[in-house]
Image: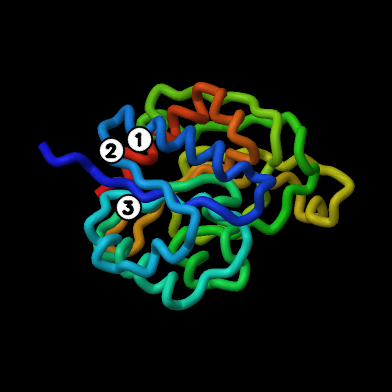
Amino acid sequence: MKSKKALIVRGGWDGHEPQKVSEVFAGLLKEEGFEVEASDTLDSFKDEEKLLDLNLIVPIWTMGDISNEQLQPVLKAVELGVGMAGCHGGMCDSFRNCVEWQFMTGSQWVAHPFNDGVEYEVNIIGSGSSPIIEGIKDFKVKSEQYFLHIDPSVDVLATTTFPLSDGAHSANGIIQMPVVYTKMWGKGKVFYNALGHHADIFDIPEAKEMMRRGFLWAAK
């Protein structure tokens, strides 16, 4: 049986520990029988033929810029069925000036009002709504709580609640924000988990298991 292939492209802002996160993700994928290539350059996106031979693309690249020559092959590969899965700023705060990337991935980070170290709960949407969350219960994390601008087409699998606080956003009341979601981009499946500020968030069994299942769900 032919092995599935995954490409991890890591880099950007070092504060999100792209190297360590990539090692966690590569381990999960290899345990599931994937051949995994890890790249430290966005130029890995330029080879359209190579991308189309993949089953899964995993971006771990916070901030920075992507050229049109790097972007277009990724958009096309996912549209034609190659899966995309990632977490935190490594996927949805990758290229702030690139609305096409945001359109494909389904959201864009805009704030974490309480910064790092806030304790909050991740609430799973009704059991059975997706195999990604089947049997997983609500759990607590101590990390950044991401406020995202969200594509209304996403299928939300887990949320978190922003309480009233001193921030200007609280003028809108208590806010329920997606944490984990899926969406489609053409024939391609897209999975996103807003957790992952540091690699150790995946020491939490529920966070790690959702990533594992998300990879498997998205992969072509």
Q: Which x, y percent locates residue 113?
A: 78, 48
In the image, is residue 213 above or below residue 149? above
Q: Are marks 3 and 1 in contact (CB under 8 Å)?
A: no
Closest to the observer: 85 or 128?
A: 85
In the image, is residue 93 above or below residue 36? below
Residue name at image x 35 percent, y 57 percent: 184
Read off the residue under disc 3: 83
Q: Which x, y percent locates residue 23?
A: 48, 35
Q: CA distance from mark 3 to mark 1?
A: 13 Å
Q: Are marks 2 and 1 in contact (CB under 8 Å)?
A: yes
Closest to the observer: 153 or 58?
A: 58
Q: Which x, y percent locates residue 68?
A: 46, 77
Q: Earlier in the sequence, mark 3 or mark 1?
A: 1
- Identify residue type, mark 1: Leu
Read off the residue under disc 1: 29
Secondary structure beneath disc 3? strand
